[in-house]
Image (tube, rainbow, N blue to C red):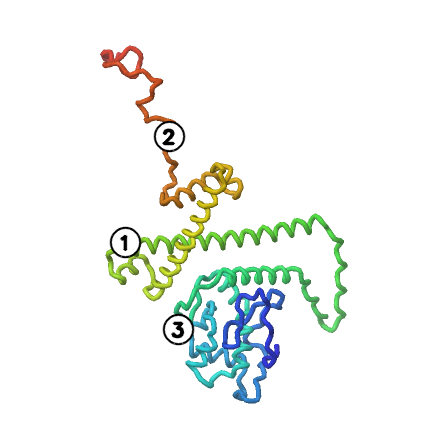
Amino acid sequence: MNADTPNTPPPDAPEALSAEGAEPPPSPDAAPAATLDAAPVAAPAAAEPGMTVKACADELRTRFPALFGEPKPLKLRIQVDINERAPGVFPKAVLSAFFRRYTLSDAYLKAVSTGSQRFDLDGQPAGELSEEHRKIALETLLQRREQRRGQPRPARGPRDGGQAAPAPAAKPADPEADARRKAQREAQREEARAKHREAQRAERNFRAGLLRAFETTTLTRENFCALKGVDPATLDSLLEAARADRAQRQTFLAELSKAYRESGLSINEFAASKNMHPGQMHHLLREAQGGGDDRRPPPRGDRPPRGDRPDRPPRREGQGDRPGGDRPRGPRR
């Protein structure tokens, strides 16, 4: 990869690289990333002589171990921060080549696909990781896995000066086996997406509960963080994300309630038009009307309270639940 010739980032890249130093794009069609011990990248004439990608990686680990230890999602425009903290140390072309390799590695893509926050040079949260970047990183990993499975293993060379073994004959195509493998891969992708959605749902629920507790607590900030097991440095970002989630949900519920009133349909018919269960639709409409998160159905208006039914005669005084009234019972034999 030539460091002097910048690559045009693909439109679906999870980490778009801007001229000021955002992250490089992991293209889904790119080959698996090489290790950081690869051949040195040539720097431009004005850059420091002798600086290689490996030397750049070692220097970054030494200066910023909190960020370049275990792979973490990088803060956008991280190159600007590096040049401010270490001016003139890293040639621009070599630093860009390092980030192209680093952000295309499987380890970094895994960190992006499962992360929720970006991190700065000190290892502190520096912005939320977008859903689009997580999705593209996961799809890139899955595509690489499929490519590796489809590639044949390289033939071994001759031993003891002998001739190489002939390549095995190609197996005839089996449409049923191909269909099963394709269905299995699709099931694995769906399982990965379901796990990702479940993790996101758990994060939203945690943030929502944290915000509700923070708005009603009488504890100090330090004691509240200790009680909830939250780092005080990340509390503000978590609360801000929770407020954004709440505003988004209120907008969704208001639009849903408006569409229901204008449709003139029953709850069951409206739920079917939205591909939802009637119980779920009933719960959402109740929440939109200010009913909170109470999942219990409202009392039926066509049924009077128990004991006031007109079709049941009043119970006479002294009459028990069994025939014969409250007759005295003798001792058991």
Q: Residue at x 52, y 44 (%)?
A: 274
- The numbered disc on residue 152 is none
Quadrant of the image occupied by residue 289: top left
Q: Quadrant of the N terminus?
A: bottom right
- The numbered disc on residue 122 is 3
Q: Secondary structure at mark 3?
A: loop
Q: In the picture shown, does residue 39 fall above or below 262?
A: below
Q: Position of residue 176 (x, y in %)?
A: 70, 48
* 2 and 3 marks in contact (CB < 8 Å): no
- The numbered disc on residue 216 is 1
Please give left or right for residue 146 compared with residue 299 in the image: right
Q: Residue at x 48, y 62 (%)?
A: 130
Nearer the observer: mark 3 or 1; the answer is: 1
Q: In the picture shown, does residue 247 fall above or below 46?
A: above
Q: Residues within 10 Å of mark 1 (few under 14, many from 20)?
A: few
Quadrant of the image occupied by residue 156: bottom right
Q: Earlier in the sequence, mark 3 or mark 1?
A: 3
Total numbered labels placed on residues in the image: 3
Q: What's the amino acid at mark 3?
A: Asp
Q: In the picture shown, does residue 213 fall above or below 78?
A: above
Which residue does the numbered mark 2 point to in the structure image? Answer: 301
Q: Position of residue 88 (x, y in %)?
A: 47, 86
Q: In the picture shown, does residue 132 fall above or below 60?
A: above
Q: What's the amino acid at mark 1?
A: Thr
Q: Residue at x 49, y 60 (%)?
A: 131
Cα separation, mark 2 vs mark 3, equals 61 Å
Q: Position of residue 89 (x, y in %)?
A: 47, 84
Q: Secondary structure at mark 2?
A: loop
Of residues 54 and 256, the one nearer the viewer is 256
Q: Residue at x 58, y 62 (%)?
A: 140
Q: What's the amino acid at mark 2?
A: Gly
* 3 and 1 marks in contact (CB < 8 Å): no
